[in-house]
Image: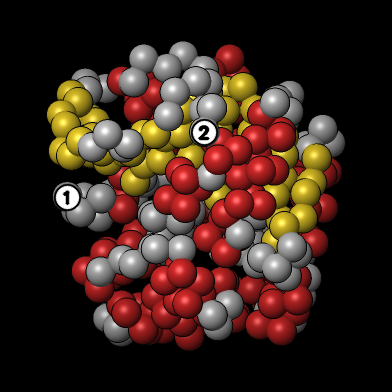
Amino acid sequence: MDTDIRPVLESTDTIVDTVDTTDGRLQYETRGTGPAVLLIHGGISSEAFAPLLNIPELAEYRLIRYRRRAYDSDYAGSPPVDVVDDADDAFTLLTALDIDRAHVVGHSHGALVALQMAHASPSRVMRLGLLETGLAAEVPSAGTAAAAFQPAIDAFQQGDLLDAADLLSRCIFGEDYAAQMEEAGVRPSDAQIRREISATFTSDIPAQSRWSFPIAAANIRHPVLSVLGAESDRHYLRVVGAPLISEVREAVSAALPQAKHVMIPRANHLLQIAEPAAVGAALAQFFN
């Protein structure tokens, strides 16, 4: 891919730039110096890793968060972006930043991208942090989970994008997700919400059915930290009727026996927004 980097905004603490490729644009933000840590967001909100940039335990690392291609305001929405495409984009970003190797941390769908990176180019990934890996389509309760998402799907198909985003967020993150995001300083505009819920439904969800976790995991030998919310199963038992995150943990352990699991108290799927200090401390300890 051809790349071109141009600055958008600079401050003393943070640089926000873009990397243009032949397939789209990647907006990214960096903070700090030291070993690189690439943060890959999941669905619904591209801002979910922003709170981690201010965690003291991570100050000795070069943190990089970016907006995946399908979530960019310039992206036309077609064709959908597969997990492999997202991984290729992530490598393009690292290359543009002159980073040969990085720790890679992914949340939900972003964890699939992190896994694909480790599968496709093992030498460029140091350690893998997986925040509630987005394996809802590959666990035993996949069918009941899909049924729980149906009201949000219906709203999206009817063009009610804000309602679709709210319904899906309540189902995945919990009833108090908006308050948690507000407290963490994550305040997306309505236009951003509409754009990102569209990316979730038109790119991320279809991409998950075209990607295989067992195939990707087969050759991964990297150290792996699986970060889970202690309240997630309680929430999913109520909403989905199944301990979805326990099933995800079992799937990760079966495919990646080297994975270590850590539970974040008081957190559900929005764990790095609800408890950024605890998540950041767990990651820093793992990297060290």
Residue 13 point in image, percent of width and height: 32, 36
Q: Report the residue at 58% width, 15% height from top.
A: 123
Residue 122 point in image, percent of width and height: 60, 20
Q: In the figure, is residue 238 to the left or right of 34?
A: right
Residue 191 point in image, percent of width and height: 21, 69
Decide which of 155, 103 is in the foreground and name it: 103
**Image quarter (top left, top right, bottom left or bottom right) of the N terminus:** top left
Q: How is the image coloured?
A: secondary structure
Few, some or many C-alpha atoms within 10 Å of disc 2 (few <14, some 14-19, many ≥20)? some
**Image quarter (top left, top right, bottom left or bottom right) of the C terminus:** top right
Decide which of 115, 187 is in the foreground and name it: 187
Question: Residue 74's mark?
Answer: 1
Question: Residue 59's mark?
Answer: 2
Amino acid bearing label 2: Ala
Q: Report the residue at 24% width, 31% height from top.
A: 19
- Tell me the element at label 2: loop
Q: Report the residue at 57% width, 23% height from top.
A: 125
Q: In the figure, is residue 188 to the left or right of 52?
A: left
Which of pointers 1 and 2 lies earlier in the amino acid sequence? 2
The answer, for residue 198, to whether it is visible in the render is no
Residue 40 point in image, percent of width and height: 47, 43
Real-space Cα separation, disc 1 to disc 2, in angstroms: 32 Å
The answer, for residue 132, to whether it is visible in the render is yes
- Tell me the element at label 1: loop
Q: In the figure, is residue 185 to the left or right of 215?
A: left
Choose top left, top right, bottom left or bottom right for residue 135. Answer: bottom right
